[in-house]
Image (cartoon, rainbow, N blue to C red):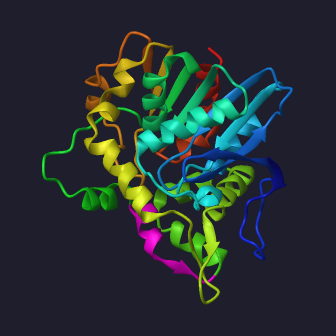
Amino acid sequence: MRIRGVGLVPGCDSVGIVTSSFAVDVQGGTLAVHELAGDSDSPTTILAVHGITANGLSYATLARRLPGGVRLLAPDLRGRAESAAVTGPWGLAAHVADLIAVLDHFGLDRVPAIGHSMGAYALALAAARHPDRFERVVLVDGGIGFPTPPGADVDAMLGAVLGPAQAKLSMTFADQAAYLEFMRTNPAIVETEALGPKIAKDLQSYLFHDLVPRQGGVLGSSCVPEAIRSDGADTMIDSEVLTAASQLTMPGTLFWAPRGLQNQTPGLLPPELVESAGLGPRVRTEFVPDCNHYSIVFADHALDRVLNALFG
């Protein structure tokens, strides 16, 4: 089913990214998949997998940079945005099944794909389990494991890593402006928004796409807390997830940023972790300077590298 729309909160003024959205049946409900570039006649289709509290519209800037003849399909993963109504199971194995369902729905045998943050872990796991479905993979600031000590508090670790992205799950906001003001407490968001007016609009539309009406006329995050926790735990303690990137047999690239989710140094993937990841000979690593965990999928100089990797 194809639905034309912008995927924003009803009745709210917003900058909007107009997309074509498709409904894909998955276990537990219907997954929303956004066509951010190209169409069914495009000779090349790229599958894009977003981060843990993000949504498919996080790839709008990449979509605008794609050459002609390229289609970009970006699902809202289960438990987020327009796929928030999908019930469990949660966890990265469920995302893998959903991604394969998306490829099957569109009749795609084998595609290049990109995953950012948690999406990189989900994509690496999908490509390790289904190597025949992925032509090449691009992992952006995620996808390699940093094992968690036994007995570690996963919730505390998620809160420390995600910062405002985690805190927003239990908050409500009077309107989009209040939500944006809160997100701007994160210097990584401020830096990304400052990259230019078009990028700022892309960023804001992606952020607003997460908002849903709550009782009392306020807005809140669409993210299902149980989904976020399960997915986050998998990136920390699931041995198959932690080693998936080292099992890849197709060409791949891992990009990593110097600064993290809150603009801190070191970033999510410190240099020593990248060096010790044990990636196979088909996967190269590339440091992207002058960016943080968010701006690496918005900044021109970072997307130049991403595009080169996607098209070989």
| Image x and y of residue 146, in percent | 26, 38
Task: Place residue 241 in its image quadrant.
Answer: top left
Residue name at image x 61 percent, y 36 percent: 101
Residue furthest bottom in the image: 216
Q: Where the C terminus falls, by quadrant?
A: top right
Residue 141 at least partly seen = no
| Image x and y of residue 217, in percent | 65, 87
The magenta span reads: 163-174
Q: Is residue 256 above or below residue 291?
A: above
Count of marks, rendered view: 0
Q: Is residue 204 above or below residue 52?
A: below
Horizontal side of residue 166 vs 134, given as left or right: left
Of the pair 207 and 232, the residue shown nearer to us: 232
| Image x and y of residue 31, in percent | 63, 49
Residue 52 counted in the magenta span = no
Q: Is residue 176 above or below residue 21?
A: below
Horizontal side of residue 89 vs 211, given as left or right: left
Residue name at image x 65 percent, y 58 percent: 82
| Image x and y of residue 27, in percent | 55, 47
Residue furthest top in the image: 281
